[in-house]
């Protein structure tokens, strides 16, 4: 009798969001990790696109930490990053994967500033 390996039961939160204001420094977000996996899990960006579907390269991934590059444009507003979580499997389970779609919204930065005018009279 031959016993085949089972399908890997890896599961993910398939749709995740990240909203943050424009910044001149890089920003990070930890994505929700895979669960129920059999074997070690690795994560890799499959695609990253702006709201028009044009490929971009503003995001990097290290483990479950997604990094948005400094000065990511706000004029594109929404980005979609697809991350693949792959479970290696083991002696009882095949390798398997699930995709995670992260919708990233970059809003305009809050205006912060002040004006000081010495020896000035209005009116």
Image (spheres, helix red, strand yellow):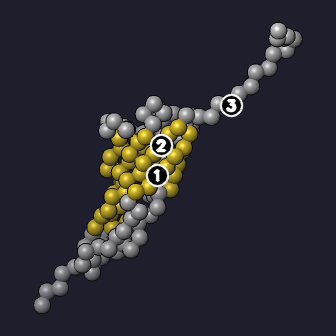
The foreground one among 52 and 38 is 52
Which quadrant of the rendered structure holds the N terminus? bottom left
Residue 17 locus on image (x, y percent): 46, 52
**Picture layout, residue 108 above or below residue 18:** above
Residue sitting at the far bottom: 1
**Picture layout, residue 44 above or below residue 93:** above
Question: How many neighbours does mark 2 have within 10 angstroms: few (below 14), some (14-19), or many (20 or more)?
Answer: many
Query: Residue 49 — which label?
Result: none
Mark 1 = which residue? 17
Q: Which residue is pictured at 55% across the width and 34% down the height?
A: 108
Place residue 12 in its image quadrant: bottom left
**Picture layout, residue 15 above or below residue 76:** below
Place residue 109 in its image quadrant: top right
Left or right: residue 71 compared with residue 8: right
Residue sitting at the far left: 1
Q: Which residue is pictured at 42% across the width and 48% down the height?
A: 103
Distance from the alpha carbon under mark 1 to that under mark 3: 26 Å
Q: Secondary structure at mark 3?
A: loop
Task: Determine whether label 1 and label 2 are within 8 Å by CB.
Answer: yes
Query: Residue 105 — which label?
Result: 2
Q: Secondary structure at mark 2?
A: strand
Distance from the alpha carbon under mark 3 to that under mark 2: 21 Å
Query: Residue 112 — which label?
Result: 3
In terms of sequence position, does the residue under pointer 1 or pointer 3 come before the other? 1
Residue 76 locus on image (x, y percent): 42, 33
The foreground one among 32 and 39 is 32
């Amino acid at each position: 009798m031959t016993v085949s390996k089972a399908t890997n039961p890896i599961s993910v939160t398939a749709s995740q969001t990240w909203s943050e204001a424009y910044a001149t420094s890089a920003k990070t977000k930890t994505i929700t990790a895979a669960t129920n996996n059999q074997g070690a899990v690795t994560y890799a960006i499959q695609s990253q696109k702006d709201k028009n579907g044009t490929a971009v390269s503003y995001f990097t991934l290290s483990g479950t930490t997604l990094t948005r590059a400094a000065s990511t444009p706000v004029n594109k507003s929404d980005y979609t990053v697809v991350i693949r979580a792959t479970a290696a499997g083991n002696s009882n389970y095949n390798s398997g994967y699930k995709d995670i779609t992260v919708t990233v919204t970059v809003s305009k930065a809050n205006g912060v500033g002040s004006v000081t005018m010495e020896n000035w009279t209005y009116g």
